[in-house]
Image (spheres, helix red, strand yellow):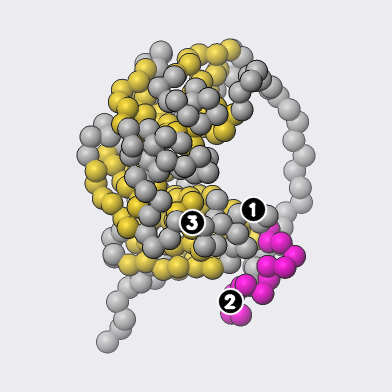
């Protein structure tokens, strides 16, 4: 009898590890592709804010607009085409730890270090607040800028909270329904929801990455980072997963079993 299907398998694809991290890799796994040559960038725009520190940035998926969350709790949307401030939202009263647009650009979400989660309607010319929930996101300024994740269809919003040991999935269109709560064994520091929302990746303070298959109800832990996993992010295809810690970036290939 064949064994039951397990969670998707992660294999290292490309890595930017520190010089001392190679001994952490399992002996049967190696980095499979050389690093590309560096790309040189040129500055196109510069926006400044006096006495404020930007904490996270999100780009609109279809318009030349980006949003920026600051340590003061202010969220501003800015037009690149017009080089001007569009909106300023002051629903939060602490540092912004998460900021994200929905895939269709009709909604925006933000959260802060006090655990407040906000939903904005961006489908109209002047964006406005739709709902604010208190004490739902983990209250920790260290969670960001990867504190929020949304499915490719825009139906599910995932975040760490209300504690560091729970991931909550909510109805993203209204924030009025908790779809699922996933208990965790360790202090979660980042998360990413796969495009189809069937797989949840969670990074931990214990230098571990956990892959949770919501369909098969299975989970698997992976080691490889030298520090807390501060960021994990699926690519739009869902076939690769980026993880980052203090001094390294890893790119994993996701294989279905």
In terms of depth relative to the viewer, which is nearer, 46 or 207?
Answer: 207
Instruction: Give the image quarter of residue 199.
Output: bottom left
- CA–CA distance in space, label 3 to label 1: 13 Å
Q: Secondary structure at mark 1?
A: loop
Badge 1 is on which residue?
Answer: 246
Between 179 and 242, the one nearer to me in the picture? 179
Q: Is residue 232 above or below residue 112?
A: below
Does the residue at mark 1 contact the one at mark 2 (Cβ under 8 Å)?
A: no
- Please provide the residue range marked out in magenta: 16-29
Mark 2 lies on a secondary structure that is: loop
Question: Seen in the image, is 176 located left or right of residue 44?
Answer: left
Residue at position x 51%, y 31% from top? 95
State the residue position of label 3: 203
Q: Residue furthest bottom?
A: 1
Kindly indicate whether the residue at mark 1 contacts the one at mark 3 (C-beta within 8 angstroms).
no
Q: Position of residue 253 (x, y in %)?
A: 53, 62
Give the main secondary structure of the magenta stretch.
loop
Q: Earlier in the sequence, mark 2 or mark 3?
A: 2
Quadrant including the C terminus: bottom left
**Please, is residue 99 above or below residue 253 in the view?**
above
The spot of residue 19 in percent (x, y) is: 75, 65
Sequence-wise, the earlier of marks 1 and 2 is 2
Q: Residue at label 2?
A: 26
Q: Which mark is residue 66?
A: none
Give how far apart the Cα atoms at labels 1 and 2 are: 21 Å
Q: Nearer the viewer, mark 2 or mark 3?
A: 3
Look at 53% across and 43% down and name the residue there: 142
| CA neighbours of label 1 inside 10 A, class few (<14), some (14 to 19), many (20+) | few
Magenta stretch contains residue 37: no
């Amino acid at each position: 009898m064949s064994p039951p299907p397990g969670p998707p398998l992660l294999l290292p694809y490309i890595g930017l590890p520190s010089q001392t991290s190679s001994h952490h890799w399992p002996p049967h796994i190696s980095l499979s592709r050389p690093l590309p040559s560096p790309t040189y960038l040129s500055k196109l725009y510069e926006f400044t804010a006096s006495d404020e520190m930007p904490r996270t940035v999100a780009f609109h998926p279809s318009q030349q607009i980006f949003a920026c969350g600051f340590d003061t709790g202010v969220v501003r949307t800015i037009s690149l085409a017009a080089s001007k401030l569009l909106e300023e939202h002051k629903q939060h009263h602490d540092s912004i730890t998460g900021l994200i647009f929905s895939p269709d650009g009709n909604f925006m979400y933000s959260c802060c270090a006090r655990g407040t989660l906000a939903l904005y309607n961006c489908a109209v010319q002047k964006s406005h607040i739709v709902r604010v929930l208190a004490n739902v996101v983990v209250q920790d300024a260290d969670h960001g800028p990867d504190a929020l994740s949304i499915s490719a269809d825009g139906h599910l919003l995932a975040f760490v909270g209300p504690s560091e040991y729970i991931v909550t999935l909510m109805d993203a269109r209204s924030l009025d329904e908790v779809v699922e709560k996933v208990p965790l064994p360790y202090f979660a520091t980042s998360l990413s929801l796969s495009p189809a929302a069937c797989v949840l990746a969670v990074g931990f303070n214990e230098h571990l990455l956990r892959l949770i298959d919501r369909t098969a109800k299975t989970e698997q832990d992976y080691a490889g980072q030298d520090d807390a996993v501060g960021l994990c992010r699926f690519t739009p295809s869902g076939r690769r997963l980026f993880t980052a810690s203090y001094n390294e970036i890893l790119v994993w290939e996701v294989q279905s079993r």
